[in-house]
Image: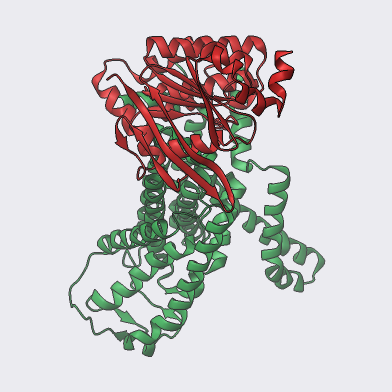
Chain colours: A green, B red
Amino acid sequence: MGEFSRSLMPVFFAPGTRKLKPSKWFTLGFMLFLALVPIHYLITDSTWIVKLFISANIFAILAMSWDLLSGYTGQENFGHHFFVGVGGYTVGLLTVALVKGATIEGVELPAIMGINVPSFVIILVGGLAGAMFGFLIGVLCLRLAGPYLALATLAMGFIFIEFTDRILPGLNPVLETHSTEGIYNLPHLTGGNIGALYYIVLLALIGSLLFNYIFTRSHYGLLLKAIREDETATKALGINTTFHKVMVFTISAFFAGIGGTFLAYSVQAIAASYVDTHLLLKIISICILGGMGTITGGFGGAYFLMLALLGMDEIARLVADITGIMEIRSAYKIFEDLFYYGVIIVVMLFMPEGIITSMIKKATALYYRKSE
Amino acid sequence: MTGKILEVKHLTKRFGGLVAVKNVSFYTNQGEKLGILGPNGAGKTTLLNQISGFLAWDEGSVLYKGRDIKKLKPHERAGMGMGRTFQLVRPFKEMTVKENLIIPFLSPRKRRLLKKSAVSVDETIDEILAKVGLLGKKDTFVDQLPHGELKKLEVAKVSALKPDLVLLDEPFGGLSAGEIDMLSSYINFLNKEEKITFVIIEHRLREFMKIVDRVVVLNYGELIAEGAPQEIIKNPLVIEAYLGKGGAEIAAA
């Protein structure tokens, strides 16, 4: 057993044993549950639950990628939607440019290259394109930290939104004729099979959870934490913090790009309004809800937010049904954002560690007290 | 290698109109414990920041192991075996004592050294912790350590780099007499057994004079004296720097 795997043993197993830690059993169980979600679709033939989980899975990927850079390494990136957008637009533009026989709004596209590029190549290219922009922005923002870094990356996000919203459509006649605001009616990733799409996204989710988790729990994760805690002291110990910061920027943007391609594929469209600051706020909120700098917080937070929004919607419907005032539902839709940012403020005030992180801590403490 | 490990030549640093370090030259011999003494604001920390690469200088040069290091970044200087601590302790707060000590092991320098040795990271860390007396607190989070142990941890962290030269910025600040004794003996141990050269900055005289071999004294950014600790205490210029004009007569009386 090498140094690397030996250092990971205590992460997954209880001290001195080969028994999985309780939190890991829980994650395994949750993964099993996620794998069984499409059963709902088989039984009821309604797709909304599966679609909801596809969206939550994608947000889990995005939240973990943001957490790696901003939560774990402490580099506040407020331009994450940029990288997601790069992934999404890679799907849109490559489909328009390359895929033979692709149609937008019923009109067959004059495929420029006329080659049929497999979707998984497009997804990979989307990730790599995200990584490339992550690297560039990482290098550009090398000397910035804290609020300055946040503002600079936020500005880059706005530039991206403006570019995709106003300039990009004018550059390509096909885009201009068929859609002014975005690229719609993209081909379905799995030929209309929503179950297959679900499992592909789930696979990507498991891959990115495993990578991010092992990456941050290894010695390398400690190094990222050290950069967050005190960059000067880390430098003084002979570590090239600049190099590692750019590297994490790149990796984080890679996963954001991958998530972006799935975002585009899952709704079969990409537009500037899909990847604007609302998306960024949602990603950050998920991490705050779940707990920052833990990876698992971003992962669990995505489902927590999905449930919370679903629950609030149900409550609004129930209240409307009981009182007979149907306006409550439509009013709720308007105030949904307010509710949801309110929840975040409450969590930040009373559970600064995040809901998932505090739950894991309490459950673990309880388990070990019982077993003693 | 014998001879001068560090040579500072005519170093000058200006902050606007203030000259923080003025034409300072000194050297450190291999295996020596050199003290840099001076009252508050004498430019000691500025000097140390320049040597370790966190601050550029306006004029002069610094030779480390005979090489001009002006263009090298802090981590590159550390990679050449030049470690440092900070006046205020800078532990990685949300980590345990052991995790704090893992960080230097992740530097390219340490990885190179580890490749050659048969001992694992864990064993080496335990060894260091045992020597510095923190083995029992291996898994304690550092925010629960008292100030004296944090100071020791900082020195342990630097020593983990297996440096050739360590710059200590006020290592005894805020420590009790007992804690100073323990830290001093650890520094002496590193100096003798691990052959580490030390440059130690302090503004307090008593404890400091016991462990250094030779002292240079700074005042208002200028080098005013150099010599053995016993001579330095008697030097009128040094007494004047600490007590003001006429201080020598008062001290003699």
The reply to whether residue A194 is in sight is: no
Above-or-below relation of B39 to A150: above
Q: Position of residue B232 (x, y in %)?
A: 56, 18
Q: Position of residue A369 (x, y in %)?
A: 63, 19
Residue occupying image coordinates x 38% and y 27%: B105
Q: Quadrant of residue B219?
A: top right
Q: How many marks?
A: 0
Q: Quadrant of residue A141?
A: bottom left
Q: Position of residue B116 (x, y in %)?
A: 24, 20
Quadrant position of the N terminus of chain B in the picture: top left
Q: Position of residue B113 (x, y in %)?
A: 29, 24
Tell which of A185 and A66 is nearer to you.
A66
Tell which of A105 and B102 is nearer to you.
B102
Residue occupying image coordinates x 29% and y 72%: A94
Tell which of A310 and A136 is nearer to you.
A136
Quadrant position of the C terminus of chain B in the picture: top right
